[in-house]
Amino acid sequence: MENQENNKFLGEEKISKLLLKFSIPCILSLLISSLYNIVDQIFIGNSSLGYLGNAATGIVYPITIIAVAFAWCFGDGAAAYLSLCQGMKDTKNAHKSIGNSILVTFIISIIFLILGFIFKDQLLYLFGASDKSIDLARDYYVIILSAIPIYMLGNSMNAVIRADGSPGFSMAATASGAIANIILDPIFIFGLNLGIKGAAFATIIGQFITLIVSIIYYTKTKTFKLSIDSFKMNFSVFKNVIKLGISTFITQLSIVIISLVCNIMLAKYGALSKYGADIPIAVIGITMKVFSIVINIIVGIILGAQPILGYNYGAKNISRVKETFKKVVIATFIVGLISTLIFELCPRVIISIFGTSDELYMEFAELTFRIFLMLVTLTCLIKMCSIFFQAVGEPFKAALVSLARDIVFFVPLVIILPNYMGIKGTLIAAPIADLLGIIVTTILVLRFFKLTLKEKASSKENIYLKNSKPGVIITISRTHGSQGKAIGEMIAKRLNIPYYYKEMTALAAKESVLDKEFISDINSNKDIMHDLYLTTSPVKYAIEAQDKIIKMIASKGSCVIVGRAADYVLRNNNNVVKIFIYAPLDYRIEKVMEMYNDTKNKAKKNIERSDKNRASYYEMISGEKWMNPSNYDLCIDSSIGKEKTAEIILDYVKKITRK
């Protein structure tokens, strides 16, 4: 992660210039990735295999998506954790998260390989294979499955390369494999007359090259170094990797569910129509992969906008958030509109790229492009808004937007409509889901801008770093209601040294140009997806700002710092005494009721939520347990009283500083 000084240009540079700088590399990288899914179908469709060959690859495609869902879950999770570690200047846990990610990806890939062979035919029939296509599907599947560990490891490792600050190398790794696949496809399919097996061999060789290039990068990484110790399982660290990668896993799994349901319904109602079971399966596979090109362009645009949105949202620079969102919406609409015109006006030209066949095949392909992709512009806007919500720290809304269209609306529609409309019902389900999905998306976006992004100027407080005498720095972590703030202030007064609590957020805001209230509210966020919220761009900037300020505070001399994982941030300082203050639940409930005039039930809920969020924050950035006594020099029960607790802490500090 860049430091805050370098991030400030995100709040000052012309937005259109920033979008071009960040989005174009993202678009190119994603388009290269999509080549893997398309090249085989182009060459297979133009061979003697025809649409049956394309049907076979379409059947296998969702199975590979299941594999990549796990790979991206662990890879993206490790990449996000690496980004957090970079912000915290943490070299202790970053390499462990990556090594554990590689190890678990490999183990899962072997399990996937074994189960895939055991249930080979069952899976192929489940995903739409017919008696005509099963042999081709089996030939393609066996070869692809044999190399699944290579495929999964390559995808998992590639995500970390991007997070290590080398998106160009990441793109090169993917491109090298894709280029090899393109070159080898015609050689194997036509030159060596290997047919669909040749396409599979070309694919796995490309995947192998991508993996080798990725491994080469791991020998010269920028921010982490792998060792044997990196691959020893650390469940505390890996738990955070899973938390950070779960949203990617859910997204990929939704693609599998859509593909599975769609293929089942197409096979069932296709068999009852003049098209048969195989033509619809072949056509929908091509349609989805062509559509993926459009979606990858949109995803590239909004991913490029993520750092701009995240930084300016954290700074509460609402005008720039709105301007960025507006420009991304316009770009998305233009791409969607052009795509729609192409799909509606010349579907036969597109489908011909993947080979020509009989008139029935071309007829259904034309029907599919014109109906299934009728409202592709809305699909693009829905996907864009989902990533927008992720960028501004709203992971729950991001998931809701994505899943509403795909799972809540499309899946039931694609099951229900064919009962009344035959095979056309499977196609009409998509535009209806788009219409319903955009309604949900629009409501959430409007509410977000109306309620969440109210323009306000950050308060300008005359707060500054205080010089202090050389000496001990006392960090205080505490459970909610244990009176840790008051005890910390009492200790600071007794020692006549500066006390920092709310002052930290004000100083971090002043230093980073982020909004003070936003930084302060990180641990009070009530989102049910709080762990994912902590990984969003604006929160990362806030965490980085806090980290910098805490270290600056410590450099000024002796002080007391309450909260914000200061004990972990200052872990390399020799003059730090780490205190953890706790108390029985009944005592804390009583104190919270006194302080905030809460009811007993409300006080208990507030304590539970606050403690959970503090633990989540601490564990996310440190990989350590928040209440683990081994992380602190002294843990003390404050129910003995504020004064007594402060005295014991002061005595302890005096004793250890004399040594």
Image: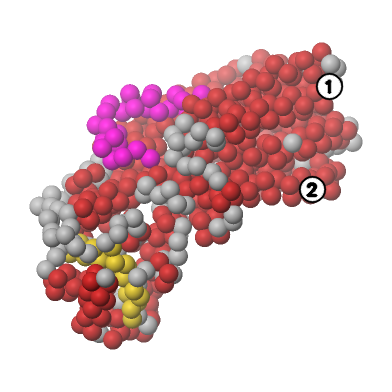
| Quadrant location, the C terminus | bottom left
Q: Residue furthest left?
A: 462
Q: Main secondary structure of the magenta part?
A: helix
Disc 2: CA contacts within 10 A as few (<14), some (14-19) or many (>=20): some
Q: On the image, which quarter does residue 341 sit in?
A: top right
Q: On the image, which quarter does residue 601 sit in?
A: bottom left
Q: Which mark is residue 114?
A: 2
Residue at x 48% of width, y 26% of height: 168
Labels 1 & 2 near each other (Cβ < 8 A) = no
| Chain part drawn in magenta | 1-28
| Quadrant location, the N terminus | top left
Q: On the image, which quarter does residue 83 sit in?
A: top left
Residue at x 70% of width, y 45% of height: 109
Asked whether 599 or 235 is in front, the reply is: 235
Write down the residue under mark 1: 195
Instruction: Decide whether residue 618 is among the magenta residues.
Output: no
Q: Is residue 8 left or right of residue 350?
A: left
Q: Which mark is residue 96?
A: none
Give the residue type at disc 2.
Ile
Q: Is residue 433 left or right of residue 311?
A: right
Q: Earlier in the sequence, mark 1 or mark 2?
A: 2
How far across and how far down the image is residue 512, in percent?
Answer: 24, 44
